[in-house]
Amino acid sequence: MPDLLQPPGRPISYHPELTKLVGSIKAAILLQQITYWTPRAHDADGWIYKSEKAWMEEIGYTLKELRGAMQELLTRKFIKREYDRTRHELRVQLQVETYNSAIQGLCEQRTKEHMPKENVLKRHVLKGNVAHTKREPAIYQKGTCTYNVVSRDDTEMTPEMITPPSPSRSRERVLEGFAEFWPKYPKKKNKGDAERAWAVIHPDFTLRQRILTALEEARRSQEWLRERGRFIPYPATWLRAKGWEDEYLAPEQPSTLWTEPIDETE
């Protein structure tokens, strides 16, 4: 038998059980892709920036199929969708609490379906000279979605396989290093915007060290020391402009660095 050829591109897998939650296979596949991208999103709040064309190419849907699947997820409140006018892009956000709650219920339902209908504990009781068998219902204790459930391919399905990391863990990941950057930046304005700019850059260790080194140089420069730091850009502006790649003029004479928050606007 000749070898089978594999189609080009990356395959997409999904959990068939998700169909019970969203009502259709197309919506289930889209939800699976959203849960895949959520922990990988560069946005600190978990927003996924993808155009309809990008979703269509990734999943293989027509525009009508994509919008129909998206509407099913919106109706069931699994996602939020909006148009970011600042970036002129469509963005989608998984509602993690709603999703986790639904998965919790799915796990409990699946576990009950796999339990024997009559789960009893036999116990011998001596009454007089005759031994009787007493049948008592066994205790079933609900857990927190930690059941051993067997999937269709006979592999153990655990919640970790279908539940994305919590928003707090995703946020910590994309903001790694920001806690070191923020105290050193002299103009502490619009921290939320600065966090979003940092999350988009998502610098690795090498780039973080480069940013901090350039920041120390900038703080000592003529430009940033002029008029008590009046010309220091907002931190988000500096990050988006890749200010760490700029060249700065060394101070003409030793000066005190401005470490207090600057009240002047740009």
Image: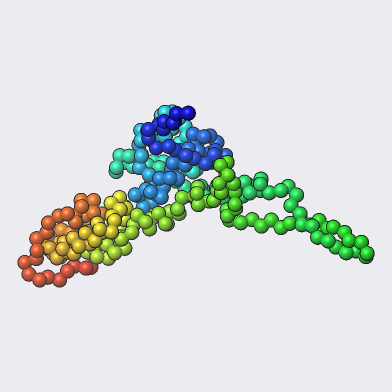
Query: How far from the left and from the top, in percent, is residue 177?
Result: 30, 61
Between residues 86 and 32, which one lies in front from this camera angle?
32
Query: How far from the left and from the top, in percent, is residue 185?
Result: 23, 63
For the question of whether residue 169 can be seen, the reply is yes
Q: Residue at x 71, y 48 (%)?
A: 116
Q: Is residue 257 left or right of residue 82?
A: left
Query: How far from the left and from the top, in percent, is residue 26?
Result: 49, 34
Q: Is residue 119 left or right of residue 38?
A: right
The C terminus is located in which quarter? bottom left
Query: How far from the left and from the top, in percent, is residue 58?
Result: 39, 36
Rendered view: 242 above or below 34: below
Q: Residue at x 23, y 68 (%)?
A: 260
- Residue furthest toward the front? 1
Rendered view: 78 above or below 225: above
For the question of whether residue 263 can be seen, the reply is no
Number of numbered callouts drawn: 0
Quadrant assignment, res 226: bottom left
Between residues 128 and 40, which one lies in front from this camera angle?
128
Q: Residue at x 12, y 63 (%)?
A: 221
- Residue furthest toward the right? 129
Q: Is residue 33 left or right of residue 241?
A: right
Q: Residue at x 33, y 59 (%)?
A: 176
Q: Is residue 72 left or right of residue 214?
A: right
Quadrant assignment, res 203: bottom left
**Way the structure is coloured:** rainbow
